[in-house]
């Protein structure tokens, strides 16, 4: 059965010291509550990974990078490889976030290289997809998102696809305070699951965690997570406050 996952994406926020404090605060509460059924992930900047790993109970909390290099190693100044991420003790890599696609020109071709390296290094990709506002307004969101999957993760074999987590993040809902309605989230998550079933079979589809991302907060998490095809969230702004993030974890 698929897992429920609540993952924080800290983006380009927190100094190392602030990040460690935030991780410790989440760790203390998660440990106490023993919320065993929800996988908790902290997506930190590269610079924080190893320290955050040291400061959390890694049996309860997974640590994630927000990206990795498209090359295994070599003369690529400023890049951080999947093997380097793995060597910190992190277990996840967020890939294909809309901010990376938009601001750093990440294409499906680049993402396929990153996916391969992530899987080769036994890291779990949290693969993001989602449509911009104009596509939603034109009613073409399903076609757009399924196409993002077809160009990338649907090219994996079923075994590798079974290792990934999908995150649906409508771009118009990211950081805008405008959340997808519970119906909009459920509809797209169901469309994604149906497309996975058509590609890899119903069992793989049933076992794939599909997270919602986009202005998810302590007030709306409960309603969003109650949808049958929403298996948790990828949380931006609200993951920077331990209290809010914990409330979202406890929304189940
Ligand atoms: P917000 O929760 O700040 O809208 O960000 C969502 C997101 O982009 C998570 O990856």
Image (cartoon, rainbow, N blue to C red):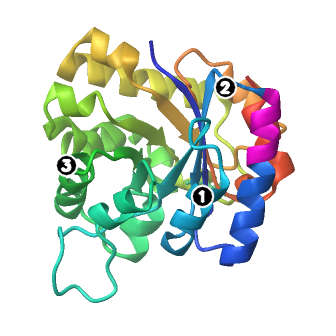
Tell me the CA gap for discs 2 and 1: 30 Å
Judging by the rendered image, the residue that carries numbered circle 3 is 120
SS label for mark 2:
helix
Q: Nearer the viewer, mark 2 or mark 1?
A: 1
> Which corner quadrant holds the N terminus?
top left
SS label for mark 3:
helix
Q: Residue at x 81, y 57 (%)?
A: 241
Q: Residue at x 68, y 28 (%)?
A: 224
Label of residue 225 in the image = 2
Q: Earlier in the sequence, mark 1 or mark 3?
A: 1
Give the side of residue 13 with respect to residue 68, left or right: right
SS label for mark 1:
helix
**Which portion, as a residue range, is magenta?**
27-33
Q: Nearer the viewer, residue 77 or 203?
A: 77
Judging by the rendered image, the residue that carries numbered circle 1 is 54
Q: Earlier in the sequence, mark 2 or mark 3?
A: 3
Rendered location of residue 57, percent (x, y): 64, 43
Residue 34, relative to residue 138: is it above or below? above
Tell me the CA gap for discs 1 and 3: 24 Å
How many labels sit on residues? 3
């Amino acid at each position: 059965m698929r897992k429920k996952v609540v993952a924080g994406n800290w983006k380009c926020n927190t100094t190392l010291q602030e990040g460690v404090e935030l991780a410790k605060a989440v760790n203390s509460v998660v440990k106490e509550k023993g919320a065993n059924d929800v996988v908790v992930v902290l997506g930190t900047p590269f610079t924080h990974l190893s320290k955050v790993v040291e400061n959390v109970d890694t049996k309860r909390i997974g640590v994630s990078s927000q990206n990795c290099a498209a090359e295994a190693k070599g003369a690529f100044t400023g890049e951080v490889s999947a093997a380097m991420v793995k060597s910190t003790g992190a277990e996840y890599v967020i890939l294909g976030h809309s901010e990376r696609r938009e601001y750093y020109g990440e294409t499906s071709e680049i993402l396929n290289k990153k996916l391969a390296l992530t899987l080769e290094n036994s890291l779990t990709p949290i693969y993001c997809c989602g449509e911009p506002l104009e596509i939603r307004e034109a009613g073409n969101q399903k076609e757009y998102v399924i196409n993002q999957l077809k160009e990338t993760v649907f090219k994996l074999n079923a075994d590798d696809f079974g290792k990934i987590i999908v995150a649906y993040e409508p771009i118009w809902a990211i950081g805008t305070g405008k959340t997808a309605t519970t119906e909009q989230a459920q509809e797209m998550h169901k469309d994604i699951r149906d497309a996975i079933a058509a590609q890899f079979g119903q069992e793989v589809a049933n076992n794939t965690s599909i997270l919602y991302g986009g202005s998810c907060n302590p007030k709306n998490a409960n309603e969003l997570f109650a949808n049958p095809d929403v298996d948790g969230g990828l949380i931006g702004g609200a993951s920077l406050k331990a209290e809010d993030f914990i409330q979202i974890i406890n929304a189940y």
